[in-house]
Amino acid sequence: MVYFVGAGPGDVDLITVKGRELIKTCDVIIYAGSLVSPKHLDFCKEGCKIYDSASMTLEEVIEVMKENSQGDSIIVRLHTGDPSIYGAIKEQMDELEKLNIEYTVVPGVSSFTAAASSIKREFTLPSVSQTVILTRVEGRTPVPENESLESLASHKASMALFLSVGMIDKVVEKLKKGYGREDVPVAVIERATWEDERIIIGTLEDIAVKVKEAGIKKFAQILVGDFIDSEYEKSLLYDKTFTHEFRKGVK
């Protein structure tokens, strides 16, 4: 059995209990060495085969899984954050299906939620935004034309941008066009929840300069939207006058 496991954003203890237990019992682990904390490997049992996929191709990863899939072997494919978001797991799962190798996916804490926790913010504030857009700016990997950053930003929703901080000027230019203003709050969180985490707060007007002055070029989330700094309405959920299934409101 192959388990695609989300390792979480950085802090080794932000993996799920299920994910940690699989690491403790697995016979083979293939981890994304360029992104996943090597401290996770401290929990592997003696004799566990360890592979760093940073320098491996898809074919090489699948071959390791194939070679070790006999009997009751447990194989962990350890991805950063949550494997369903920019995890490139679909192509791996397709190959496993061709080989009739069973697999399952164990979710993890994504870097976008970790980034929000680092700046102590809530994406979905009443009267501000009830929508979160996860996206990236086009680089070597293109994005569909109808998912341009300008178009998405025009919705004025809370946004989390992956894999984009190295093109911060391009990001800001597109976001300004979409939001139609320069005072939109922006937070850049480098290596969220790692020991060397850094946080830069600004607006579309000055964030690019701040990020370049800090020398941040990768491993960072860009959070954008008024949820970072704005007035908002309180939730009805805890309003004393609001009645719902579990509580009768008072007049």
Image: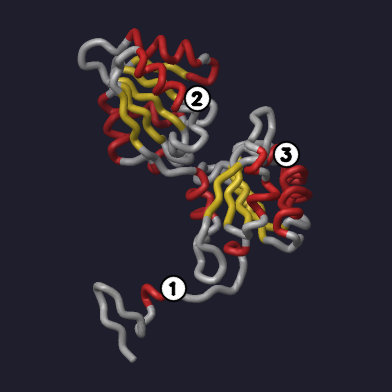
Label 1 or label 2, whichever lies nearer to me, is 1
In this rendering, the label closer to the viewer, 3 or 2: 3
Q: Point out the frontmost of discs 1 and 3.
A: 1
- Is residue 54 shown above or below 196? above
Which residue is labeled 2 in the image?
33
Q: Nearer the viewer, residue 23 or 65?
A: 65
- Comes first in the chain, label 1 or label 2: 2
For the residues labelled 3 and 2, say whether their Cβ atoms are less than 8 Å apart. Answer: no
- Tell me what residue is drawn at x 34 percent, y 35 percent: 106
Q: Earlier in the sequence, mark 3 or mark 2?
A: 2
Label 1 close to label 3 by CB (< 8 Å): no
Q: Give the residue at the far front of this rendering.
A: 146
Per the rendering, the mark at residue 235 is: 1
Give the total of numbered labels.
3
Q: Residue at x 51, y 66 (%)?
A: 125
Q: Nearer the viewer, residue 31 or 41?
A: 31
The span from disc 3 to disc 2 (Cα, nearest Å) is 23 Å
Of residue 174 and residue 227, the one placed in the foreground of this image is: 174
Crowd band around label 1 with a 10 angstrom C-alpha radius: few (<14), some (14–19), many (20+): few
Q: Residues within 10 Å of mark 2 (few under 14, many from 20)?
A: some
Q: Quadrant of residue 162?
A: top right
Horizontally, residue 161 falls left or right of residue 77, namely right
Q: Position of residue 180 (x, y in %)?
A: 75, 60
Q: Amino acid at mark 2?
A: Gly
